[in-house]
Image (cartoon, helix red, strand yellow):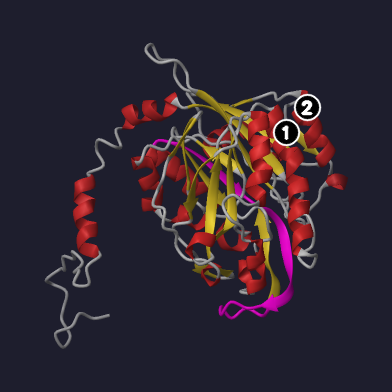
Amino acid sequence: MEDRSITENGNREQNPSKVVTSTSNGSICGFESLHHLLRSSLPVDTFQEVSRLIHGMNCGKPLDPITLPAAASSLSSDHDFDLQAYCFQAQKESLREPRIVRVGLIQNSIALPTTEPFLEQRRAIFQKLKPIIEAAGASGVNILCLQEAWTMPFAFCTREKSWCEFAEPVDGESTKFLQHLARKHNMVIVSPILERDVVHGETIWNTAVIIGNQGNIIGVHRKNHIPRVGDFNESTYYMEGNTGHPVFETAFGKIAVNICYGRHHPLNWMAFGLNGAEIVFNPSATVGELSEPMWPIEARNAAIANNYFVGSINRVGTESFPNPFTSGDGKPQHKDFGHFYGSSHFSAPDASCSPSLSRYRDGLMVADMDLNLCRQIKDKWGFRMTARYELYAEMLARYVHPDFQPQIVTDPLIPLVDNKFPS
C-alpha cells in the first residue's frame, strides 16, 4: 500500500513518490479497493462522513471491526490473501436471545495458467484454497461460501467443450475435499461447482452443493438464470436450473444461494426471501467492464427489500485462454474475459454493508451477524405486510399469456396520423 502519513490537522498526507497510478493489476489507482482509496485520500472526518453515506449505519453506528485469532492473521500473511472482519449487530430484545452466526466469503484467482493439464489446475486450486479455508476455520466461521465454479477457470466464454471435463458429480472430488474441512471446523460450506448429473444423461448444471457442518450433503441448488451477454456464453454448457428457490435450514441458520446472474432478477431474490432465507449468498464471476457499477447496488437492494443478509462473492484476476474467441458483439477476437474484480462484501437488511475485499488479491471476508436483525427490520418497515402480492400475482398471471395486453392509458389529445400514433 501507499506510504501516507497523518498531518497535525488530521489530514492524510500523500507521499507523491509512492503513488501508483497503474491499474493493470486490477487496483484502483494503486489501491486495493475504493474503501482503501478514500481512507488514504480524505481527511479523517470527511472519510467518516463519506463512509457513512457509502456503507450506511448498523444500529445507528458504523460497523465494528472484529479482531480475528492470530492463527488466521498468520495464514493471511503467509499466503498473501486479504483478510477483513466486521460485526453486524441487532437491537437487544427482551424475549429473544441474540442469534449470532459467523459467516465467511472466499474470493480467489486461479492457481495455474489455463494451458496446464486440467487435473493439475484443479488440484492447484484445492491447494491454494486450503489455507484460506483453514483461516476461516481458525476464525470460528460457522457458514462459508466459495465463489462460482471455484474448482476451475471460468472458461464458458470460449464455447469449447473440453472444459466440461471439470464437471463432476455432486459427491465428487471437490465435495469430498470440503467434507473433511467441514467436519474438522464444524462449518457449513457452500460449494458452487460445475455439476455432471450422471443420473440424467450426464447433463451439465451450474450448481451449489450445500455441505453440512457434520460433512453431510444437505442438498443442492442449480442456477436459475443463465446469461447470454457479452462473453458470458454459458448456455453453451448448461441451461436454467430446475431446483426452484430452496432454503436450506442448517445448524446455524436458514441460507439460500442466488448464483451469479440471478442477482439481476429481483423476483429471484424475492422468492428466496418468501421461502424464509436469513442469509442469501451470491457466488459470482463477473468483470469490471460489464457489471462493476451494478455490483455494490443489487445485493444491497436485495438485502433491504427482502429483510435478509447477503454475501456477495466474485473471483479475482484475469484468466487468459489458449485460443482466441469472439462473442458476436463486434469486438475483435481476444483470449480473456477481462478483469474479475473481486470486491466481495456483505450487505444487511438495515441497508448497512461492509467494505469490500481487494479488487485483485485472494481474500477472506468474515462477518458476525445477529440474525434477529432480519425480523427487527421486517417489523420496522412492514415490507411483507404492505407488499400487495396478490396484485402482482394477478399481473404476472396475465403477463405470461400470449394474448397479454399492457395497461396503457393514452392521452386522447395526442394527434393521430393515419389512425396511428406518431413515433
**Quadrant of the rendering where the N terminus is positioned:** top right
Q: Horizontal placement of 168 versus 310: left or right?
A: right
Q: Is residue 321 visible?
A: yes
State the residue in front, 70 or 187.
Answer: 187
Image coordinates of residue 266 in percent, x first then y, are 39, 52
Residue farthest along the bottom direction in this orientation: 418
Name the residue: 56% across, 78% down: 329
Image coordinates of residue 129 in percent, x first then y, are 73, 44
State the residue in front, 370 or 201.
Answer: 201
Badge 2 is on which residue? 71
Amino acid type, residue under disc 2 in the picture: Ala
User: Mark 2 touching mark 1, by CB under 8 A?
Assistant: yes
| Residue 135's disc number | 1
Image coordinates of residue 294 in percent, x first then y, are 52, 54
Q: CA distance from mark 2 to mark 1?
A: 7 Å
Residue farthest along the front direction in this orientation: 199
| Label 2 element class | helix
Would residue 78 be counted in the magenta stretch? no
The span shown in magenta is 307-333
Amino acid type, residue under disc 1 in the picture: Ala
Would residue 312 be counted in the magenta stretch? yes
Q: Horizontal placement of 28 versus 222: left or right?
A: right
**93 vs 7: above or below:** above
| Label 1 element class | helix
